Image (cartoon, rainbow, N blue to C red):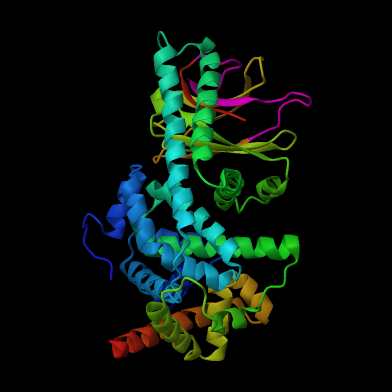
Amino acid sequence: MPAAGPLPDSPSALIARIAQRDREAFSRFYDAFAGLALGLIRRILRDPAAAEEVLQEVFWQVWQEAERYDPKRGSPEAWLVMRAKTRAIDKLRAIRRREKTFVAPVDESVTRSDEAPGENPGVAAEARGLVRSALNALPEAQRRVVELAFFDGLTQSEIARKLGEPLGTIKTRARLGLERLRAVMRREGQGAR
Amino acid sequence: MNRDEIYELAAGYALGTLDLEDRERFEVLLNARDPEAVTALREFQSTMTDLATEGSVTPSPGVKAALMARIDAEGLARDAVVRTLETKRPERARWPVWSMVLTGAMAAGIAAIAVGLAVSSAYDRRLAQLQHEAAAIKEELNRQQAIVTLLQDPATRFVSLGALEPAAGASARMVWHKTAGGLLVVQGMPPTPAGKAYELWAIPPGGSPIPAGVFTVDAKGTASLRVSPVAAGTEVETFAVTLEPASGVPAPTGAMYLAGKL
């Protein structure tokens, strides 16, 4: 669990140092969060080589744009996760558009269980089980909205059109889905300790 | 705005799915440090981060090695530009300094290449770097469809502009297409003095600088400038930024802040 205070190696402190072009801080930030980012990218992009390419893009962006990090808009981890997700979805769309490569439907990519080379087996298995369990605990309509949003990168308007539902309904499902997801993950996380 | 509405906006913001109008509404709340908005966003982002930790995957060592080499190459390139100008400039920047800029840009390129040769698969790395540059810039422009189209054109070029002495710490990138024009994005520039503006110049090989637009920077020293194409048949070799009167001038007169070669 990252430290909450302004310790020298806290994520916030590292980002501040990276903004000052501190190479060592960048190295530590990478070591701390590259696995997390690549795990997310691999959930969206199933090609390991493309995923590592995106990972490099994401961390290069961290190096170039650390000074633009705004704590008001979330933690460094959340900042990184959003960038990783955006980059991965951009890449996925580029692959679909340019190469017409077959890409598994969202449901399959979210629920697939094959092990990826290089995973941390213990941590990964525990986290994967926890998250899948939490996602499966959502009502189908809410789960669909969360997955389309997070793993397929659709905007709320796009989701509304895709599902043929009013925009207001999609907004409400996103809120309820995340609230429930949070409650489930918190409960199961406590139970696992 | 009631609690449910704030939480709906926060959920969409954390998921990254808000439409532009809703995102701007929520950012107004964040900028005002609305406690309910801040709390809701923190909770949802925490959930999103937990969601992202599923299946943490250890990257190949080559990813980090390539990043660190790239960082080192960038630093060497910047130092080379600054060193060249500091050692060769006899007095405050005057206009003929363009020749020194070209020398500096060449030195920067040589430094970058020297480092690149020391890295395995240098050619592949260079290709990946160009793709990364394209991707980083694309995010900043993703609401400008015309620019996206520009980025997708294989003839589009990407140029990093090095910071000169008056703008130490600044950086800039240019997306350039000789028939469609381009976009300049700058960061970390000094505040624009009253009555002044930064002016971009497109410089043909051996030719006179062509005015390419004026801009000012925001409180963070950032700005972007849409750049029109130069006259048909005119090749551009170098881009540079100088500080000039706010209305812009037909030929550069002020100190140079940024420069980079195509």
Q: Position of residue B167 (x, y in %)?
A: 41, 28
Residue at (41, 85) in percent of width and height:
A130
Location of the C terminus of chain B by quadrant is top right
Location of the N terminus of chain B by quadrant is bottom left
Q: Is residue B165 left or right of residue B122?
A: left
Q: Is residue B240 magenta?
A: yes
Main secondary structure type of the part rendered in magenta:
loop
Note whether B250 is above or below A6 in the view shown.
above
Note whether A188 is above or below A168 in the view shown.
below
Q: Is residue B50 left or right of residue A173?
A: left
Q: Is residue A99 left or right of residue B77?
A: right
**Residue B70 appearing in the image:** yes
Name the residue nearer the viewer: B98 or A161: B98
The span shown in magenta is: B227-253
Q: Is residue A64 magenta?
A: no
Note whether B222 is above or below A58 in the view shown.
above
Name the residue nearer the viewer: B72 or A147: B72
Question: Which corner quadrant of the image does residue B252 belong to?
Answer: top right
Question: Which corner quadrant of the image does residue A151 belong to?
Answer: bottom right
Residue at (22, 54) in percent of width and height:
A8
